[in-house]
Structure formats: structure tokens, C-alpha cells
Image (cartoon, rainbow, N blue to C red):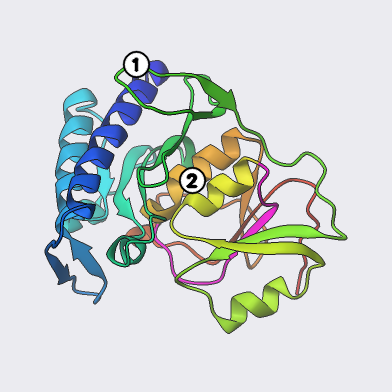
Amino acid sequence: MQFDLLTSEMRRLALQAGAKIMEIYEAENFAVRSKSDDSPVTEADEAADALISAGLRRAFPDIPVVTEEQAATHEQTAPSFLIVDPLDGTKEFLQRRGDFTVNIAYVQDGIPVRGVVYAPAKGRLFYTTGDGRSVEERGPFGESPGATEPVGVNPTPDNRGLMVVASKSHRDAATDNYIARYALRDMTSAGSSLKFCLVATGEADLYPRLGRTMEWDTAAGDAVLRGAGGEVVRFDDHTPLVYGKPGFENPFFVAFAPGVLLVKD
């Protein structure tokens, strides 16, 4: 894989998809339907998916592409692949809260090694560079990359008072009970893969997810977090979260800055 080319293409496609999403987001009305699992999908999901998947297949014709909105791609098995959630946080999109993202990642031998997370309504763009380090690019965003700042997790999280981020739309009692086992300085909520990015920038120390997610929901944010020095582990045994699982479904997981002392059952 040519990682410099990959970074350039992922960034370009994420920005183009974000622009298309914002056109629809800012319209007075847009079409919404329900998928087979009753989750909502909008015309923005479908337009962004078509743009990104076509662009990736054109640039990397030999690399499998797995995307949320194309069910046929979910039957693939490969150790390395591109994986896309064209609009993560559809509920935030529908409620016009802005916490939605475009997610594109490259998984190599089960590990998300490169990724881009773009939150067009927030004007925040995170991605891994060609050498795997994570950065945040400052807008306005153009065809060529602008000024970037390296991002890194909190190097010395204080276990006597952690900053925790949790899901805005998928909070439940199990998550709250788990969070209650830590000493907290404060807690915030965010939608979509922005939660990974908040840990990656040091704005949060810990992000637990005790609910159903799919690999396309997490791969890009996971890549950004790993490139910033963070970790993502399974909730049950604290082994690293891996990708390319049958059906692309994740177990519960915890994303965190090294130095956070994870509680165990």
C-alpha cells in the first residue's frame, strides 16, 4: 500500500463526501428510510457512500472495500481492506446536532493502520499521515492540505480524576454503571466517531462502549486514536480490538489513553 497516496485519497474523498452531506443537511427537507435492522438511512448516507466507494475502487482497484451501505460487501473476507461509514451518526444528522462524521479507514492484517474522520458540521478533520502519525488539520479545507497539528493522547492521565466521553445517542445503564467505577474529573458526551478523536487529542482519557457497533463505525476513529498513542481493547478480556471479524460486528470495547488503569471484573 502506498500510504502517502492513501492519505491523500482518503482526505480528498472525505471532504467531497462532507460537502455533499452538508448540501443535504442544510436543505429544508431530505429523504429518510429504514434499513432491514430498522436503523435510519438518509439520502446523504447514500450519496456520500456512492462518492467514496467509487473513488476508493478507482484509486485502489485491488483492495477490497467494505461499506456500511452496501450489504453485498459484508460477505467479504480479507486480512486487509478499506472500510467506510459514509455518515456515522445518522441520528445526530436527523436531529441536526452536528455530531456526525465521514469515516474511511484501511485495515491491514486485522489492525486499522490509517484513517480519516471528518466532522463537516463541526469543521474538524482528523487523519493519519503517510507515516501513521495522527494530525488535526485546521480549516478552511482546500484541495491541498492546510496547516496541521500533531495530536496525542493525554500522556499522564490522573486516575484520581479522569475525563470520560460517552455516547450521546446510545447511553444505557450498563455504561453508566461501568463509568461509575472510575474516579471522574468530568464527563462529556459526543456523537459518532468523534469520541475516539476526543481521546486522541487528550480532550478525554477514556471512552467505553458497552453496546452494539460495527467495524465501519469504529475503524477510522480507532486508527486516529492508535496514531495518537492510544489503545482500543475488548471490554471482556482487555485484548486489542481486531478487525475483519465475521459479519464485521464488534464486541464491547474500551478506548483509552495508556496510563488509565482499567477496572476489571
Q: Residue at x 76, y 69 (%)?
A: 264
Q: Where in the figure is residue 164, as x and y percent of width and height?
A: 68, 60
In the picture, residue 2 is in which quadrant? top left
**Residue 59 appears left or right of 220:** left
Q: Main secondary structure of the magenta part?
A: loop
Element marked by disc 2: helix
Give the class, few, some or many, for how many residues have Cα within 10 Å of label 2's Cα (few <14, many ≥20).
many
Q: Where in the figure is residue 5, as x and y percent of width and height?
A: 34, 18
Q: Amino acid at mark 1?
A: Ser
Q: Which mark is residue 37?
A: none
Q: Amino acid at mark 2?
A: Gly
| Quadrant of the frame with the C terminus | bottom right
The answer to whether residue 242 is visible is: no
| Quadrant of the frame with the N terminus | top left
Q: Which mark is residue 221?
A: 2
Viewer-closest of 114 and 201: 201
Q: Is residue 248 magenta?
A: no
Q: Which mark is residue 144?
A: 1
The answer to whether residue 233 is visible is: yes
**Residue 25 appears left or right of 256:** left
The residues colored magenta run 202-214
Q: Residue at x 26, y 72 (%)?
A: 39
Give the class, few, some or many, for how many residues have Cα within 10 Å of label 1's Cα (few <14, many ≥20).
few
Viewer-closest of 29 and 201: 29
Q: Is residue 212 magenta?
A: yes
In the picture, residue 48 is in which quadrant? top left
Query: Relative to residue 193, is residue 250 depicted above or below?
Result: below
Query: Relative to residue 103, is residue 11 depicted above or below?
Result: above
